């Protein structure tokens, strides 16, 4: 028995024919197997296939659709919409839209590209345009089957746009004396984009991606997932010239960001009203948002960004209940592809990125991909700049048709500056005192960061139904500051002097993880199951070495003028006696089980649970005194999730889900007697509807959620409890509760050929519902809104690309991002809302096999000046986020 896979891509595939003329098979691809299962590609076993004398290495691509009637499909007129992409994938898309069966050798079209095809025409005319310049022509075998072959010497083109080769022999011989038996495969793959290579094709220009891995880990179509999962495609990232995570997330409802008060070039995320410090990379969690989110996440190798809304503990363990963000990275491709992108913009921005991929061996067993970028820029803020080097090589080994192994690495080195954005605060009138937003009251605080990631994953398909995937990942993050100056939250009596203290810090965070997933497909009493059983282990080790100046003890601060700052101001020496160290180690163990069941009448039920065990130890103290062990923490919990979805029509899905969550508690240092606060818990109910329109090119999701988080730190009212040198009420206990609920709307996709749109809106009513009173300025008072969580958030983005005529390839677009005001933790300071307008224009054209695109984007077109997320801690200075002025970013992109 010989394993022989074939690559298939079509909608409503009913029968696949392997014709006797095929004599040699090299390589592999994915196949819909004869089990009547939809939207699943598997490896199939074929008996009786023998190749004694192969004429030449070839990969066979067969695309077939059942037709009724006797009309020649080549004469039928229909509207085709095929984006510019590799010729191989364009032909697969053509077969899906034309109801034709294509037979061609992928070797003959490898490395070729096809121009965008959009218009009403016959199949013959469409094929002629797709094959233009390729040296290939076509021949109808029968009314519904077409074979592609090299153009003969007597080839000519007629005036009606159809290729007319002279009659040729009907011989099917290919130079071999071996004949193969005819093989019939039955399948039901009614997804028009079920080709597994289509979603990651570098020429794919769609705003809508049909599948996502974040919600279920099983690559389930979004329309069959009873969860709110949003995917930001690479075309959106290109159109908006996204180079930081905060800008990408503007395209998802209910997600906002803020810079942390520490002043590092990072972002804290808020999803459904709850902040999170965890980011995922292909399902691998990277904790501590102060070190790996926001501008620290390079986008040179990002394929798409997935956002799962609501509790994700069942598959990912201890996370915040609002949701999770998963970035998916680019993987090696069989078809060679090369890209160079040069960006330039305001504040001396220069960014160069490259992307190269393809096979390293003739039989495609060894593939590679290399992404790299270099970026340098200044800022609208004084004394702030950035230089970033990023490398991401990947090597994939296709060991057999059923087994693959992938080794990947990322290296990032960044030299930037800590930018603590500060304004004086008028305590008497409870308002900030405005200053020019470029003014920096600190110094050029150096920050050096080095991130290293190494990952290895392998997968094996046991048979048509069962597979296993295992990944081992390691990530090391190292951050060092020189002598950096920070706000001492003090103004002198003259009100024109700002006091700073000095600090030097070294942080490291090492993460080691192993994740094992087993996926199976089976039937019980006519019900189709997709079973996922898995486990994961994470080890987090954090290290802090921190020293400050003796300012607080001596009162000898470094002072600078507020109205006329002169840099550098008087320097401060670091006091060795203040050197402080801390070490924390956390072990996370998890086991999870999930079953996705397809019932009659297009009902889908998803259910599962996770067992989580966590053990954490720590030690800290002044170096001069020695490190003191902290209280060890051991916690475990079981978190379930269940969802149901009904698809009464292929374009409509109605769903509901219930999920529970298990998360960290950030106020352990305020617990009395050295005890640790228990983890937070959460429960969510959600109902929603999803719709796909225009053959799946436009998708809309409308949802309503009700999410409650318990065990939030609140005031310990025991008068005998004192913490951190404070008086009564300075300790915390876990009795608080925060509720967030409201509607969400996400729309993305193509309305008409060339016209793409994204529209989002959410109204999130987030409030503290239970509390004993505030602790440590966290604002946990009944009725308070959570810090920096706006009630209304919305965005609109649209682009249009001219499809034909002299302006073909010209694209224009723009959008608005808006949110209303936010409050600080105590709800005593309100920051204004804003609406920002952006525009883009671009032009793309082909030169031979090369596509060149020039593009210009403008952010904050109206140059709005404001600050948001303002807070202070009872002093006469406060932290804010300044708006970025109008900025321009241009690019020239070359793809081959």
Image (cartoon, grey):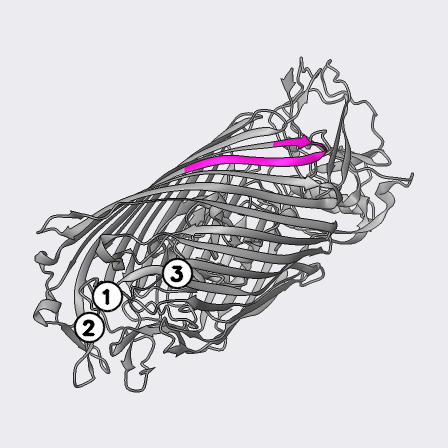
* Quarter the N terminus occupies: top right
Q: Mark 1 touching mark 3, by CB under 8 A?
A: no
| Numbered circle sitting on residue 444 | 1
> In the image as oriented, which residue stretches furthest toward the right?
70
535 inside magenta stretch: yes
- The first of marks 1 and 3 along the sequence is 3
- CA gap, disc 1 and disc 3: 23 Å
- CA gap, disc 2 and disc 1: 9 Å
Q: What residue does disc 2 label?
A: 567
Q: Residues within 10 Å of mark 3 (few under 14, many from 20)?
A: many
Q: What residue does disc 3 label?
A: 268
At which x and y percent is residue 565? Answer: 21, 78
At which x and y percent is residue 246? Answer: 45, 61
- CA gap, disc 2 and disc 3: 30 Å
- The first of marks 2 and 3 along the sequence is 3
- The front one of 367 and 727 is 727
Q: Is residue 660 above or below residue 717?
A: above
> Which of label 1 and label 3 is nearer to you?
3
Q: Is residue 805 above or below residue 198?
A: below
Q: Mark 2 touching mark 1, by CB under 8 A?
A: yes
**Region of the chain picked out in magenta, as a range:** 521-536
310 inside magenta stretch: no
């Amino acid at each position: 028995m010989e394993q022989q896979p074939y690559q298939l891509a079509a909608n409503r595939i009913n029968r696949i024919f392997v014709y006797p003329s095929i004599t040699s098979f090299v390589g592999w691809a994915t196949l819909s197997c004869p089990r009547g299962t939809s939207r699943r590609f598997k490896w199939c076993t074929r008996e009786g296939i023998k190749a004694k004398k192969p004429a030449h290495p070839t990969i066979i691509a067969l695309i077939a659709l059942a037709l009724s009637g006797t009309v020649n499909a080549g004469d039928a007129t229909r509207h085709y919409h095929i984006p510019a992409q590799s010729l191989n994938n364009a032909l697969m898309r053509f077969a899906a839209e034309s109801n034709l069966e294509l037979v061609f050798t992928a070797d003959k079209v490898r490395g070729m590209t096809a121009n965008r095809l959009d218009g009403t025409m016959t199949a013959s005319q469409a094929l002629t345009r797709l094959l233009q310049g390729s040296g290939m022509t076509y021949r109808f075998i029968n009314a519904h089957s077409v074979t592609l072959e090299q153009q003969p010497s007597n080839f000519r083109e007629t005036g009606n746009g159809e290729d007319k080769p002279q009659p040729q022999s009907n011989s099917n011989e290919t130079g071999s004396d071996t004949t193969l038996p005819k093989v019939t495969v039955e399948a039901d793959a009614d997804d028009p984009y079920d080709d597994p290579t289509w979603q990651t094709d570098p020429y794919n220009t769609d705003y809508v991606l049909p599948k996502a891995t974040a919600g279920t880990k099983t690559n389930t179509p979004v329309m069959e997932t009873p969860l709110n999962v949003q995917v930001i495609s690479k075309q959106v990232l290109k159109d908006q010239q996204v180079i930081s995570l905060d800008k990408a997330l503007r395209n998802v409802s209910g997600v906002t960001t803020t810079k942390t008060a520490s002043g590092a070039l990072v972002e804290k995320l808020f999803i459904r009203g709850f902040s999170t410090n965890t980011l995922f990379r292909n399902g691998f969690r990277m904790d501590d948002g102060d070190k790996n989110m926001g501008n620290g996440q390079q986008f040179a190798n990002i394929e798409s960004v997935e956002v799962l809304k609501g509790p994700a503990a069942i598959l990912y363990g201890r996370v915040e209940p609002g949701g999770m963000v998963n970035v998916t990275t680019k993987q090696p491709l069989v078809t060679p592809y090369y890209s160079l992108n040069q960006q330039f913009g305001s504040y001396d921005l220069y960014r160069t990125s490259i992307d190269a991929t393809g096979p390293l061996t003739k039989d495609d067993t060894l593939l590679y991909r290399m992404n790299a970028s270099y970026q340098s820029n200044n800022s609208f803020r004084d004394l702030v700049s950035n230089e970033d080097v990023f490398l991401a090589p990947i090597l994939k080994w296709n060991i057999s048709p059923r087994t693959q192994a992938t080794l990947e690495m990322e290296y990032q080195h960044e030299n930037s500056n800590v930018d603590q954005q500060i304004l004086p605060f008028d305590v008497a009138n409870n308002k900030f005192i405005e200053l020019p937003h470029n003014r920096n009251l600190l110094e050029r605080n150096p920050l050096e960061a080095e991130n290293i990631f190494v990952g290895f994953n392998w997968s094996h398909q046991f048979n048509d139904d069962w597979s296993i995937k295992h990944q081992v990942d390691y990530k090391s993050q190292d951050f060092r500051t020189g002598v950096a100056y920070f706000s001492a939250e003090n103004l002198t009596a003259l009100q024109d002097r700002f006091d700073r203290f000095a600090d030097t810090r070294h942080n490291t965070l090492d993460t080691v993880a192993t994740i094992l997933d087993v996926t199976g497909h089976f039937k019980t009493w006519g019900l189709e199951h997709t079973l996922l059983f898995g486990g994961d282990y994470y080890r987090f080790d954090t290290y802090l070495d921190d020293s400050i100046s003796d300012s607080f003890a001596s009162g000898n601060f470094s002072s600078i003028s507020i109205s006329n700052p002169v840099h550098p101001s008087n320097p401060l020496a670091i006091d060795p006696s203040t050197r402080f160290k801390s070490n924390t180690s956390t072990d996370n163990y998890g086991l999870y089980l999930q079953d996705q069941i397809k019932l009659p009448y297009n009902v889908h039920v998803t259910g599962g649970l996770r067992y989580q065990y966590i053990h954490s130890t720590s030690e800290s103290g002044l170096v001069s005194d020695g490190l003191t062990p902290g209280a060890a923490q051991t916690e475990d919990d079981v978190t379930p999730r269940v969802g149901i979805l009904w698809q009464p029509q292929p374009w409509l899905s109605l769903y509901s889900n219930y999920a529970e969550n298990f998360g960290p508690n950030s106020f352990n240092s305020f617990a009395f007697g050295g005890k640790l606060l228990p983890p937070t818990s959460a429960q969510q109910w959600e109902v929603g509807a999803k719709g796909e329109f225009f053959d799946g090119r436009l998708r809309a999701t409308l949802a309503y959620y009700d999410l409650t988080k318990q065990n939030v730190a609140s005031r310990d009212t025991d008068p005998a409890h004192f913490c951190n040198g404070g008086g009564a009420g300075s300790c915390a206990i876990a009795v608080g509760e925060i509720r967030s609920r409201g509607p969400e709307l996400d729309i993305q996709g193509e309305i008409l050929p060339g016209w793409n749109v994204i529209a989002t809106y959410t109204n999130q009513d987030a409030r503290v519902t239970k509390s004993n009173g505030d602790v440590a300025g966290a604002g946990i008072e009944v009725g308070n809104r959570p810090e920096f969580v706006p009630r209304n958030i919305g965005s609109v983005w649209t682009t249009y690309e001219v499809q034909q005529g002299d302006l073909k390839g010209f694209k224009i677009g723009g959008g608005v991002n808006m949110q209303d005001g936010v409050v600080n933790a105590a709800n005593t300071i309100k920051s204004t809302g804003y609406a920002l307008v952006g525009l883009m224009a671009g032009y793309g054209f082909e030169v031979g096999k090369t596509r060149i695109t020039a593009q210009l984007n403008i952010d904050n077109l109206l140059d709005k000046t404001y600050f948001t997320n303002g807070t202070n801690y009872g002093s006469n200075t406060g932290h804010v986020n300044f708006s970025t002025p109008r900025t321009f970013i241009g690019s020239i992109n070359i793809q081959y």
